[in-house]
Amino acid sequence: MAPAVEVEGISKRYGRTVALDNVTFQVQQNELFALLGPNGAGKTTLMHILCTIRHPDSGKASIYGVDVVRRPLHARRNLGVVFQEPSLDDRLTVQENLEFHGLIFGVSAKERRRRIKELLDLVELGRWRDQPVRTLSVGMKRRLEIARALVHDSRLLVLDEPTVGLDAQSRERIWSHLEELRGWRDITIIVSTHYIHEVESCDRVCIMDGGRVLALDTVDGLKDKYGKEHLRVTARDDSTSEEIATRYENHLESRNGDLVLAVDGEMQVAEILSQYGTRLRSMTRVRPSLESVFLTLTGRELRDAEAARRDSLLDFARRGGEHTR
């Protein structure tokens, strides 16, 4: 079975800034594929190239065998897109937004009615079909955008940071709908995000930074190759804590008063137990995580402080006043 998406040697510059540097990968049909990286990693530029909005400086990309540069209109027939920035018409109702999209793509009236009903049920917006879009919450609008992207029976759904600015409940709901969508029909999904926990359920994850692909594998594969196991140790007294800190100073950090040591095989675990077992209050093995994978690959944590601060404020505001729908 041929890949749904092929990206080969894609590079893109904006002046002196390298947005993409020889990016190459394939996405298989019916795969849930994640692009993971911080802001500025090149994810959005890559998405724009796949969506025929921008042209690469070099390299090529295709969707179900159709070159996105040479045959952009044909490529779009298989493509549904949810951009990072909202693109709905607030003056129209939920139903009218979907009807208009179907008309643009030449979907027959009978088929539009069937698909719109199914999609509104999928994203739990059937009750609001006659409501103006401006009356919906941010999370509901994002779910409507997912439905709109599927009205023309697209085979590839591309979502660029679909959960940015949403509260935790809405983010979880978006991913739940994506999982349900995969069970409902054969579709390939590419999603970009900088939230590490969101990609745990994806088939494969492509980690990007600085416009380059750093690693691409399943979540378990990435953890096995690049993740680091840690021990979280709590000593019974300060003298033991100081002794451990001195002995393992090159593999140590402190978190909430506990000592966290990078584990170098089973021998080191046995060594710590043998040396300090009775002098420890607790010792917990922390399995490799995607955070540790990103830290290993880049030397820094994957963290968008501004987005995290904004999302935290949104969560607080909604808990205090907005009705969750």
Image (cartoon, rainbow, N blue to C red):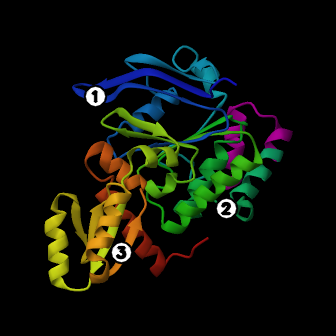
Q: Residue at x 16, y 62 (%)?
A: 249
Mark 2 Cα-neighbour bin, 10 Å: few <14, some 14–19, many ≥20: some
Residue 312 seen in render: yes
Give the spatial CA distance, label 1 vs label 2: 44 Å
Q: Residue at x 73, y 37 (%)?
A: 153
Q: Which residue is mark 1?
A: 18
Indicate the quadrant where residue 324 lies: bottom right
Residue 203 as seen in the image, left or right of residue 54? right
Is the stretch drawn in magenta largely helix, strand or loop?
helix
Query: Could you tell me residue 184's position as x and y percent?
Result: 76, 48
Residue type at tag 1 = Val
x and y, in percent, of residue 128 in the image: 70, 63
Q: Tag 3: residue type?
A: Met
List x then y, in percent, for residue 226: 38, 45
Instruction: Give the side of residue 118 with respect to residue 304, left or right.
Output: right
Instruction: Indicate which label's residue lies in the foreground, 1 or 2.
Output: 1
Query: Range of the magenta residues?
Result: 94-113
Instruction: Tell me how far mark 3 sits from mark 2, CA to CA.
Output: 55 Å
The answer to whether mark 1 and mark 2 are in CB contact below 8 A is no
Q: Nearer the viewer, residue 99 or 139?
A: 139
Q: Which residue is mark 3?
A: 283
In this orientation, which residue lies closer to the viewer: 296 or 118?
A: 296
The reply, left or right, for residue 217 in relation to residue 181 is left
Query: Does the residue at mark 3 contact the one at mark 1 (Cβ under 8 Å)?
Result: no
The residue pinned by badge 2 equals 131
**Few, some or many residues within 10 Å of mark 1 (<14, 14–19, 20+):** some
N-term mark: 1 or 2 = 1
Q: Quadrant of the N terminus?
A: top right
Residue 107, relative to residue 180: is it above or below? above
Secondary structure at badge 1 equals strand
